[in-house]
Image (cartoon, rainbow, N blue to C red):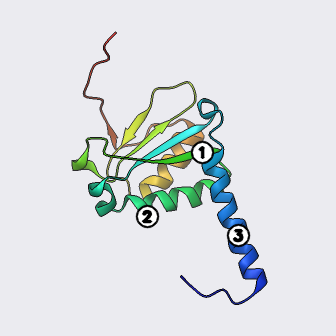
Amino acid sequence: MAKVKSLAELKAMREKLQNTIDTRERGDNPEALVQVKVAMATCGIAAGAKQVMEHMMEKADELKLAIVFTQTGCMGYCHAEPTIEVKMPGKDPVVFGHVDNNRADEILTKYVMNNEMVEGIIPVNYETIG
């Protein structure tokens, strides 16, 4: 961590961190917001999931998107890490695999903002018991 050299730097850091906290705590009505879950089990972290999540959070702030980001454990798709699940309001969740920063940008700008499908979706491999 870099040394803080002025009060202005400290205030800027505080504001940035507060925005990050606000993004995570907007979850009082999560069904009304886009939800992004990033798999952070050992395999996901080793594949770069932490960096992808940080990048997505920064990009979402830049694009002024109302998204709640959360970390989750293994989603069972170790072969496709980093994996993220995106839940749009009123829709079923979609899981994307092999997500890097470029794919994360594409998911945010195409899928989240414009409701366009993008490559890399992992098909659901189970049935719902009704």
Q: CA distance from mark 1 to mark 3?
A: 20 Å
- Discs 2/3, front: 3
In the rendered structure, which disc, 1 or 3, sits on the residue that comes first in sequence?
3
Callout 2 crowding tier (Cα within 10 Å): few <14, some 14–19, many ≥20 = some
Callout 3 crowding tier (Cα within 10 Å): few <14, some 14–19, many ≥20 = few
| x then y, percent, for residue 125 | 25, 28
In the rendered structure, which disc, 1 or 2, sits on the residue that comes first in sequence?
2
Circle 1 sits on which residue?
A: 67
Q: Is residue 85 above or below residue 102?
A: above
Which residue type carries mark 3? Arg
Cβ atoms under marks 2 and 3 closer than 8 Å = no
Callout 1 secondary element: strand
| x then y, percent, for residue 28 | 65, 36
Residue 63 at least partly seen: no
In the rendered structure, which disc, 2 or 3, sits on the residue that comes first in sequence?
3
Q: CA distance from mark 1 to mark 2?
A: 17 Å
Which residue type carries mark 1? Ile
Q: Is residue 103 left or right of residue 62?
A: left
Residue located at (78% from left, 81% from top): 8
Callout 3 secondary element: helix
| x then y, percent, for residue 119 | 37, 43
Circle on res. 14: 3
